[in-house]
Image: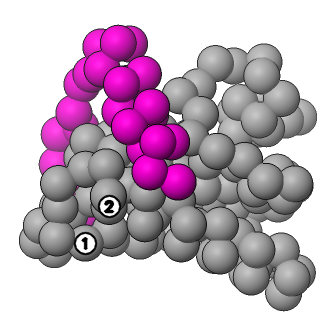
Amino acid sequence: MATIFSKIITGEIPCYKISESDSCFAFLDINPLAKGHTLVVPKKEIDYIFDLDDNLLKELFAFSKKIGLAVERAVSCKRIGITVIGLEVPHAHIHLIPINSISDMNFSQPKLSFSKEEFENIAESIRAKI
């Protein structure tokens, strides 16, 4: 059965797409810790990030760097925090989170809420910085 991320990649479920390559896909997290919180996933459905072959893992991180730098240019922050947890969806993914302190990456804190228009504006501002 396809994961929610696979359904997002194929367009079965809508998303606020940032960018894609032949092997990777980036979109805004709809339950973000910060404005610009982006998920980067391989298009190939593999549960555990360390099960990705070395070439795909390199592509995923290189693509994440490109997207992370765009997020950093689009959203006011000190850094882009990177985390891989991998328990909530059985599809490897990287969280790119604009941060100003380490506590900004605490997943137990309340998530932010944005309107559809706000999400679209955030996505567009990131895409413009790629």
Q: Which residue is mark 2?
A: 72
Residue ranking furthest to the bottom: 54
- What amino acid type is highlighted by mark number 2? Glu
Mark 2 and mark 1: Cα distance apart in space: 7 Å
Q: Is residue 40 left or right of residue 6?
A: left
Where residue 117 sits, quadrant-wise, is top left
- What amino acid type is highlighted by mark number 1? Arg
Instruction: Report if residue 129 lies within the magenta region.
Output: yes
The magenta segment is 105-130
> Element under label 1?
strand
Q: Which residue is mark 1?
A: 79
From what the image shows, is residue 79 above or below residue 109?
below
Picture coordinates of residue 57 (x, y %)? Answer: 75, 78
Q: Residue at x 30, y 20 (%)?
A: 118
- Is residue 51 visible in the rendered image? The answer is yes
Picture coordinates of residue 27 (x, y %)? Answer: 56, 40
From what the image shows, is residue 45 above or below residue 125?
below
Say which quadrant the N terminus sits in. top right
> Element under label 2?
helix
Q: Is residue 68 left or right of residue 31?
A: right
Q: Residue at x 16, y 70 (%)?
A: 78
Q: Residue at x 74, y 82 (%)?
A: 58
Nearer to us of marks 2 and 1 is 2
Q: Are marks 2 and 1 in contact (CB under 8 Å)?
A: yes
Using the image as rendered, state which of residue 115 and residue 128 is in the foreground. Answer: 128
